[in-house]
Amino acid sequence: MPIVVEIDVLLAKRKMSVGELADRVGITPANLAVLKNGRAKAVRFSTLAALCEALDWQPGDLLRWEAGDDADA
């Protein structure tokens, strides 16, 4: 998928665990892992806003577009 979620990088910078972030955002660690591992098909704006608030970042810090073979899909 051409959209990459940079949660691993942000968690490392914050020295925060997936479980701690999931608690702060109000989602399950399993759902956060789906997003973190690039398996999510969609993300709610409310979840994106909660992630930004918990990590004190902007949406552009969390999401990155990466050109690839399936960029036209």
Image (tube, rainbow, N blue to C red):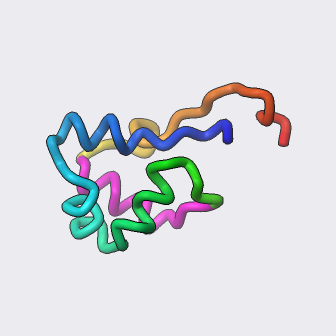
Main secondary structure type of the part rendered in magenta: helix
Image vertical order of residue 30 relative to residue 62, above or below: below
Percent coordinates x, y for residue 38 in the rendering: 55, 48
Q: Residue furthest left?
A: 15
- Which quadrant of the view contains residue 2? top right
Residue at left offset 28%, top offset 56%: 18
Q: Position of residue 7 (x, y in %)?
A: 37, 44
In the rendered view, tell whether residue 59 sits above or below residue 27: above
The residue sitting at 24% across, 56% down in the picture is 54
Q: Which residues are magenta?
A: 42-55
Residue at 29% in and 65% down: 22
Magenta stretch: includes residue 14:
no
Residue 16 place in picture, x, y as percent: 18, 49
Q: Is residue 53 magenta?
A: yes
Name the quadrant of the N terminus: top right
Question: Is 47 displayed left or right of 53 in the figure?
Answer: right
Considering depth in this image, is 3 or 29 the residue closer to the camera?
A: 29
Residue 3 percent coordinates (x, y): 61, 40
Work out whether 43 lies above or below 68: below
Q: Quadrant of residue 65?
A: top right
